Image: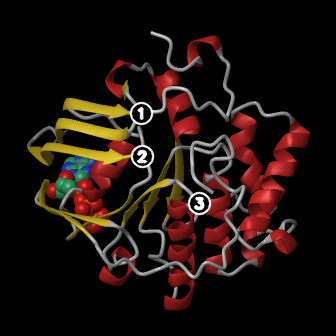
Amino acid sequence: MDVFGIRDKKLSPYMTENVHEELIRLENLVKIYDTGAIKVLGLKKISLTIRRGEFVAIMGHSGSGKSTLMNILGCLDRPTMGHYYLDGIDTAELDPNELSAVRNLKIGFVFQSFNLISRTSALKNVELPMTYARIPKRKRAERAMELLECVGLGARADHMPNEMSGGQRQRVAIARALANEPPLILADEPTGNLDTAASIEIMEIFSELHKAGATVVVVTHEENIAAFTDRIIRFSDGQIISDEKNLNPTPGSGVIHTRGLYGRKGEAVC
Ligand SMILES: Nc1ncnc2c1ncn2[C@@H]1O[C@H](COP(=O)(O)OP(=O)(O)OP(=O)(O)O)[C@@H](O)[C@H]1O
């Protein structure tokens, strides 16, 4: 199987072939944690489809299975049973190298704790995924600068993470997540370490990215954060207990300049 050229090591970040309407398809997904003495069911036969361009919140109490799901969606862990198709690819068929290549090209991660590299400038942090994708140095720097400008941090490109506020760090992390134009943005409690104003700012960026065509999946505990999304999926005890459209999402401010930020190849609507 040729996973969109990964076997050929053609790791172009701007690949848009294999565009599948269903970006995520989970079929009877089961995750069992085998701790030796006992087996814990993390996910119980989850079936779910997320279409390209959706903006989705995953909610649920502690222990409901959100992190387990995010780890599988992010190709960081494998299901015990069932299938996870990402952009039409059955991730179960990939070897570890292919899986990490898929991760780098198809998924942009945003974490609660930002996960920026300290003592490394904002610009270099954003460049990093492009280094793994073998983008030439000049192009990397250009694109990283463009992304930082889009999230309003052009003037901070040389700053280190510890010279920035939490909200600014998370904006750098979002710029980094977008570096390879991944079709999927996975954000795990992205506002968990932020105050209300910064949280709103971050959700407005996601909202604008969604309008620009990105598929964004956000795990959150907070109703006002989930309110920005178009679809809220609630988990309890490893199962989906509700999956509802949010007909009146909190709007983005529109001040974030996403034109050219995402989907320059026409995959997304800018
Ligand atoms: N590594 C592990 N080993 C054993 N059991 C685990 C492991 N990780 C998760 N679990 C169990 O799987 C279930 C789902 O846990 P998960 O971490 O996915 O929940 P969560 O909704 O993300 O919780 P939180 O909001 O607290 O992060 C829980 O019963 C948990 O105890």
Residue 115's label in the rendered image is 3
56 shown above or below 143: below
Find residue 229 and report its horizontal and vertical position in percent.
Answer: 38, 69
Number of numbered callouts drawn = 3
Instruction: Tell me where residue 204 appears, x and y as whole percent.
Output: 54, 76
Secondary structure found at label 2? loop
Q: Mark 2 and mark 1 in contact (Cβ < 8 Å)?
A: yes
Q: Position of residue 152 (x, y in %)?
A: 75, 74
Residue found 63% across the figure and 57% down from its top: 270
- Indicate the amino acid at tag 1: His
Q: Quadrant of ligand 1?
A: bottom left
Q: Residue at x 77, y 77 (%)?
A: 163
Left or right, 197 with respect to 67, comes to right
Instruction: Residue type at mark 2: give it.
Output: Arg
Q: Amino acid at mark 3?
A: Asn
**Left or right: where 29 falls relative to 219:** left
| Residue sitting at x 55%, y 90% | 197
Q: Which residue is mark 2?
A: 52
Q: Nearer the viewer, mark 3 or mark 2?
A: 2
Q: Is residue 75 visible?
A: yes
Number of residues whose C-alpha sits closer than 10 Å to that of mark 1, classed few (under 14), some (14–19) or many (20 or more): some
In front here: 55 or 82? 55
> Which corner quadrant holds the N terminus?
top left
Which of the 4 image quarters holds residue 186? bottom left
